[in-house]
Amino acid sequence: MAPPKTPKKRARSYDHEKLRVAVLAQFAAVRAAVEALTPEQLAAPTRLGDWTVKDLAAHFTMAVGMLPRCLAEPAPARTDLSLMDYPALSAPHAPAVAVGVKELAAGAPLSELYERTTAGLDTYLPAGLDGGRPVAHRFGVLSLTDVLVTRAVELAVHTDDLNDAVPGLDLPVERQLTAAATRFLADALAAKAPGGSTEVRIPPFAVVQCVEGPRHTRGTPPNVVETDPLTWLRLATGRTTWKAALDDALISASGERADLEALLPIMA
């Protein structure tokens, strides 16, 4: 007798207007924080290899500035990528992004980069845009909604990078961005390791089942991983390791299939 088929999971939906508003608000908050930094703070190192705080600050304008640049172009006829294609495509492009960031930071002043990006957002990212509009990203063509989810990840993760590099900054992240980034990276884990033997809980935003093995149907799952959204974002993007998070009691993991170390990080 053939084993029962695992039901196909429907893609998660996101509210593109709420994401649009949150992206604009977070970028404005980052801009205000960056403009208040001293030259000494901008020259400080970050946890991102050889990037300084100034390099990281310039990267925000690259990551968010792609929205007006792409939206200024005629819309492609159709999308050719899904949101779940995105994580695997990020690592191959990382070296080019790193080079571009260094060139950007060495060029125009940060104030000019932020002013230019803000003006572009005001012009090309108004309310009322169609979330299904195809947008030509460097990786391929995604819907506007999907691109906004990827920007949520960029802003949430890099705001944490900025907080880590500048003691005392503690810049908050818009709840909509944290929620979208957490859910997307949880779904990406489930896509990377499909199955139903392990339940990963990231309250209050996401619960997914993953990893091959006996499928859980009711009652308490035999394999459970639980953590908070910030720890999950750090794990999923390589800012911390599974062992370090366990040692710091930032993860609870029970069951023989609850070790996710080999599956992390999800994306670069």
Image (cartoon, grey):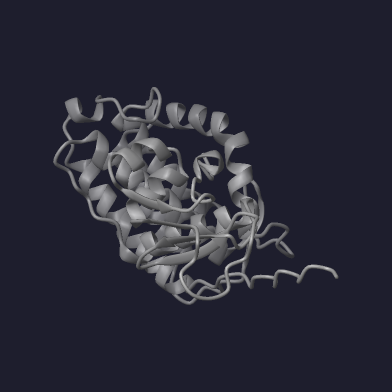
How far across and how far down the image is residue 158, in percent? 36, 44
Which quadrant is home to the N terminus?
bottom right
The residue at 65%/46% (across/down) is: 139
Question: Quick one: 268 or 119, which is closer to the camera?
Answer: 268
**Is residue 234 depicted above or below 5 in this figure?**
above
Q: Determine which quarter of the picture holds residue 187.
A: bottom right
The residue at 21%/46% (across/down) is: 33
Question: Quick one: 109 or 40, which is closer to the camera?
Answer: 40
Residue sticking out furthest to the top: 50
The residue at 54%/73% (across/down) is: 13
Horizontal side, residue 203 vs residue 183: left or right: left
How far across and how far down the image is residue 175, in percent? 32, 65
Horizontal side, residue 247 vs residue 76: left or right: left
Question: Quick one: 3 or 122, which is closer to the camera?
Answer: 3
**Is residue 206 depicted above or below 238 in this figure?**
below
Horizontal side, residue 208 vs residue 92: left or right: left
Q: Determine which quarter of the picture holds residue 240.
A: top left
How far across and how far down the image is residue 134, in percent? 65, 64
The residue at 40%/49% (across/down) is: 233
Residue sticking out furthest to the left: 168
Asked whether residue 79 appears in the rendered view, the answer is yes
